[in-house]
């Protein structure tokens, strides 16, 4: 049976990507959100529903370890942390083994240190040229990050 691996860019504008043990693309989900008042929150039920499609097949998930970014406001920092915690809680509640991966670690393994933000999307397009979802600037960026996070965790050369 083929083992699957998940890479997760956990913010409200993030994504989840599923690849197989050879690094081949299986599926993705742009992070679903729901409005709570004026704030966006990750729709945890939709994240869980997506992951449940692969129950028993996902061997490991790799979740980007997030922290505060310089110049980020308190409100947006809280929203980002809330989103990441929501996703981590879903992984724990589903008994999915996972590892936290720093942005520096996955970007280094993809050869992106010192590159601009769009370099991850460019690299993912090279690796997955038929994946048209990568063409969209913002959503494509999140999918690219999730794919490269999964590839880093799997140890597949990016």
Image (spheres, grey):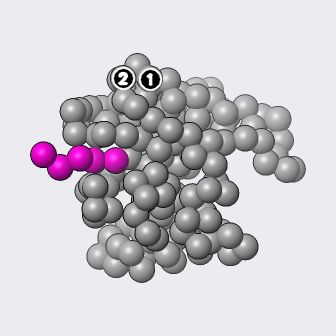
- Hey, which residue is sitting farthest right in the picture? 71
Distance of label 1 from label 2 (alpha carbons): 5 Å
Q: Is residue 94 above or below residue 80?
A: above
Please identify the quarter of the rendering in which residue 19 is found. Answer: bottom left
Residue extent of the magenta highlight: 1-5
- Does any portion of residue 95 appear in the rendered image? yes
Viewer-side residue, 79 vs 2: 2
In front here: 37 or 138? 138
Residue 44 placement (x, y as % from top left) = 44, 28
Quarter residue 96 falls in: top left
Residue 62 at what x, y percent from top left? 47, 44
Q: Are marks 1 and 2 in contact (CB under 8 Å)?
A: yes
Which percent across, then down, holds residue 106?
57, 58
Mark 2: which secondary structure? loop
Dominant secondary structure, magenta = loop
Neighbourhood count class around disc 2 (C-alpha, 10 Å): few under 14, some 14–19, many 20 upward = few
Residue farthest to the left, as pictured: 1
Q: Which residue is mark 2?
A: 95
Circle 1 residue? 92
In-front residue for pair 150/124: 150
Q: Looking at the image, is 77 positioned above or below residue 25?
A: above
Find numbered disc 1 in the image and state the secondary structure of the residue it sits on.
helix
Residue 138 appearing in the image: no
Farthest-out residue, top? 93
Q: Position of residue 154 (x, y in %)?
A: 40, 54
- Depicted 82 relative to depicted 17: above or below: above
How many marks do you count on the picture?
2
Mark number displayed over residue 65: none
Query: Is residue 36 shown above or below 6?
Result: above
């Amino acid at each position: 049976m083929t083992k699957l691996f998940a890479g997760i860019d956990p913010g409200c504008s993030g994504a989840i990507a599923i690849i197989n043990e050879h690094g081949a693309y299986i599926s993705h989900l742009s992070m679903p959100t729901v409005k709570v008042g004026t704030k966006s929150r990750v729709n945890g039920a939709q994240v869980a529903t997506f992951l449940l499609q692969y129950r028993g097949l996902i061997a490991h998930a790799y979740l980007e370890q997030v922290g505060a970014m310089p110049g980020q406001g308190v409100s947006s920092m809280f929203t980002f942390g809330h989103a990441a915690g929501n996703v981590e809680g879903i992984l724990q509640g589903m008994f999915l083994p996972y590892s936290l991966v720093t942005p520096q670690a996955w970007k280094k393994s993809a050869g992106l240190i010192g590159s601009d933000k769009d370099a991850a999307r460019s690299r993912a397009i090279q690796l997955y040229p038929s994946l048209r979802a990568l063409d969209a600037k913002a959503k494509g960026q999140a999918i690219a990050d999730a794919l490269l996070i999964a590839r880093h965790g799997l140890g597949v050369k990016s």
